[in-house]
Image (spheres, rainbow, N blue to C red):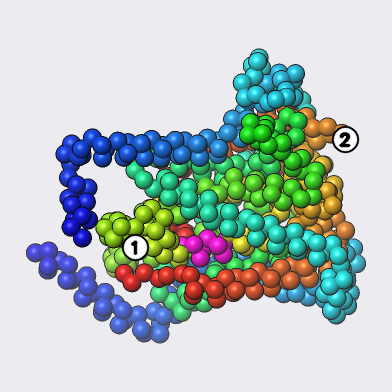
Amino acid sequence: MSMLTRRRPEARSTRRREGSKRPRSTRRSFWIGVAFASPFIVGFFGLFAYPILASGYYSFTDFNLFQSPDWVGLDNYEQMANDDVFWKSLANTLVLAVMGVPLTIAIALGGAHLLNTPIKGQPLYRAVIYLPSIIPIVVGGYLWRWLLNTQYGFVNYFLSWFGISGPSWLQEPDWTKPAIVLVVLWTVGGTMIIYLAALKDVPHELYEAASIDGAGPWRRFLNVTWPTVSPVTLFQVIVCLIAYLQIFTEPYVLAQERLNNISSGPDQSMLTYAMYLYQNAFVYLKMGYASAMAWVLFIVTLIVTLVVLASSKRWVHYGSK
Amino acid sequence: MALSDTQIVTDAGSPRELPAAKRRPKILRRLRQHALVIVLAAVFIFPLLVMVSTALKAPQDVFSSPPSLIPSEWTFDNFTKAFDQIPVWRYLGNTMLVAGLSVVGTALSCPLVAYALSKVKWVGAKPLFIMVLATMMLPPQVTLIPLFLIWNGLGATNTYLPLVVPAFLGTPFFIFLIRQFLMNVPDDLIEAARLDGASELRTYATIVLPIARPAIVTAAVFQFVWAWTDFLNPLIYLNDESTYTLSIGLYAFFGENDVAWGPLMAACTMFTIPALIIFLIGQKFFIGGISAGALK
């Protein structure tokens, strides 16, 4: 019975597939596809394709909002090479990424590992750790400004319990970057949950086999856990790197004194690339220069991503399953 | 070898058969694990407790040194002051309007495009998918300035159009998410409806939409939180105080020389609560959604 009923639609669908090779029906499905995709097609040309071309054009012009763009060739790019603030912002951003990405990966994987064991109330812990990721970044920023306050903040107070006299986080150029990374790390929950899902896929027999071979917890982690989650790690490293290269709101909120006021921390130590780009575009109205900066950011992102991908052959293990 | 063999046997056996000496370390390990997880969770939630407790503190308590979590006197004064200093209701309403319309836009547009990518057999599906992926990878800074110029040219600054219209045209990340979901739905189901003579739109509305609901809800919840917490776009497009969303409205608490921390934390608390409610309602979708997007 079931065999019979199951076979019939199959037969029909092959007939239909043959039928759909007929040009008229292809033409029909083409227009159906276009109709369903139309919001994105409009969006693609209006919000992506045209703006990309325009941005490329502006990057070769001198352009403030009030006059039409004036072609200057490679001037913007040359100016960038000689702009100390540009280099400072790029260096700040790279320092943040170099500090932040490994810490994010380590804490996310460590936390996921800890949560992966069957612990009572696990969904609750998971939710609590993810919670900061949905808090408005502005709120998180203000909150941490308060927590990092040298007189009234909890961070240095807790450090004093251990006999450590904490730094003035947001006043000393050397400490502002750790402060930014700390605020970002508070939202590591999303990364941790991706790891948690990946860890659930690690075959249990592998751990047992490793135990039988006398592997301790650290060996088990290195030989079983790490290789299994390495493809996910590659994804996380790339996503996290890109996020750090574009970081804007956290440093802006931590540094800024008032809305639309230019401040970038002591000795411009909190000025990230995206912040400097924003300042050039919307405060100094140097739209051409900012567009050129956007393209350089795109190229830097591309290069960094490709380098990570190239290196991944050495450390990412794709399972044989 | 013989030793490890016995190891397996004892591990597999029921705990009652284990000698007491072997069980205790396991209990200790469990306790240690619990303690670590609790500490981890406490670190993540602590800042939020500070926010709420500061919001409920009397002025003299706010600047206590050393800081304390428990107010010596509970008061709602900071909330009253927050309402005096900024139009909290208006900003909440503005933010709600932006987030709400963005959610409607996402729920209307993204499944349509995802359907065209996964279940309509047409030559455009592949190029369209490449377009979606390409737009996902482009840094938003590249399009930032031309987009501002377009909206500015249309006279749409200080309106919510620049914040909301893009959602109606499909967000690549959500299109991708829903498409991945639909790829796992067997074609037969949709074919069957088409064979019954249902129009394409009807098939979409009666078969595809209900099936894809988990993915659409995930996208909607994410979109709400993104729009609710967005900072850069309101900063760029909204200059008139009456149009401010909470993200940028909170700046009013920063005076020339000092910051009104009590009222600021009260406003932050009110800003957080709606996102929190959405999070609690959508938690299942949220947490499932993040891992689905990354692992598939």
Q: Is residue B98 above or below residue A233?
A: above
To the question of a shared chain for discs 2 and 1, the answer is: yes
- Whether residue A245 is visible here, answered yes or no, is yes
Q: Amino acid at mark 1?
A: Val
Q: Pointer 1: what residue?
A: B185
Mark 2 / mark 1, whichever is N-terminal:
1
Tell me where the magenta segment starts and ends, as one range: A232-239
Q: Which mark is residue B285?
A: none
Residue at 87%, 35% in the rendered image:
B256
Q: Pointer 2: what residue?
A: B256
The chain letter under disc 2 is B
For residue A236: magenta?
yes
Q: Amino acid at mark 2?
A: Glu
Residue depth check, mark 2 versus mark 1: number of the one nearer the observer:
2
Q: How many dots with numbers? A: 2
Could you say whether the residue bearing mark 2 is in a helix, strand or loop?
loop
Relative to the observer, which residue lies in front, B114 or A134? A134
Q: Is residue A227 above or below residue A150?
A: below
Residue at 36%, 54% in the rendered image:
A216
The Cα–Cα distance between marks 2 and 1, rounded to whole angstroms, is: 58 Å
